[in-house]
């Protein structure tokens, strides 16, 4: 039961942070890229620092899970395809994956160095 509360507690703050970033950046695509890259960096840092399970559940699964947004990224990619912008859609998909994976590696290295 405590695990569910940790994930839920982190998720509340991750969802609020995601909403606020969207209000500040005022662009769906910029917001999606920002939250996915920053969330990946944070999750990589948590994993690299080998934080304990309670922190990983609250911050990794809860906060980062609610903060990042794969579904919005997928919808944006499909909309580009539907609008005949295949090259942009492919570039967006590849770029997002590359940035997020790179952020995981960077965050992991930072977490390992600091942890």
Image: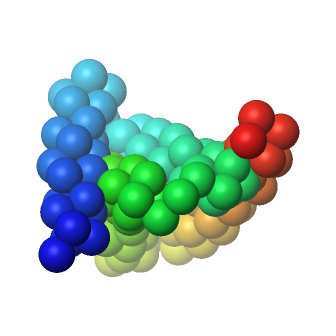
Q: Nearer the viewer, residue 81 or 9?
A: 9
Is any atom of residue 41 visible in this view?
A: yes
Q: Which residue is at a point 26% across and 23% down the rendered structure image?
A: 24
In the displayed structure image, the side of residue 49 where residue 1 appears, left or right: left
Could you tell me residue 4's position as x and y percent? Answer: 20, 71
How has the structure been colored for display? rainbow
Q: Which residue is at a point 25% across and 59% down the rendered structure image?
A: 6
Q: Quarter holding the C terminus?
A: top right
Could you tell me residue 51's position as x and y percent? Answer: 58, 53
Q: Which residue is at a point 16% across and 75% down the rendered structure image?
A: 1
Total labels drawn: 0
Question: Taking 37 as reference, is 5 above or below it?
Answer: below
Could you tell me residue 35's position as x and y percent? Answer: 42, 45
Q: Nearer the viewer, residue 46 or 18?
A: 46
Question: Taking 36 as reference, is 91 above or below it?
Answer: below
In the displayed structure image, the side of residue 65 where residue 95 appears, left or right: right
Could you tell me residue 85's position as x and y percent? Answer: 47, 67
In the displayed structure image, the side of residue 110 where residue 40 appears, left or right: left
Q: Which residue is at a point 26% across and 63% down the rendered structure image?
A: 7
Is any atom of residue 83 visible in this view?
A: no
Quadrant location of residue 8? Answer: bottom left
Q: Nearer the viewer, residue 41 or 61?
A: 61
């Amino acid at each position: 039961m405590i695990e569910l509360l940790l994930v839920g507690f982190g998720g509340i703050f991750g969802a609020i942070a995601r909403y606020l970033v969207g209000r500040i950046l005022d662009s769906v695509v910029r917001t999606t890229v920002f939250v996915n890259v920053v969330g990946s960096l944070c999750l990589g840092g948590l994993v690299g620092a080998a934080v304990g399970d309670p922190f990983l559940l609250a911050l990794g699964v809860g906060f980062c899970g609610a903060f990042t947004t794969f579904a919005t990224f997928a919808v944006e990619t499909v909309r580009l395809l539907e609008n005949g912008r295949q090259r942009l859609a492919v570039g967006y998909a590849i770029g997002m994956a590359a940035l997020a994976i790179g952020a995981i590696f960077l965050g992991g290295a930072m977490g390992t160095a600091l942890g």
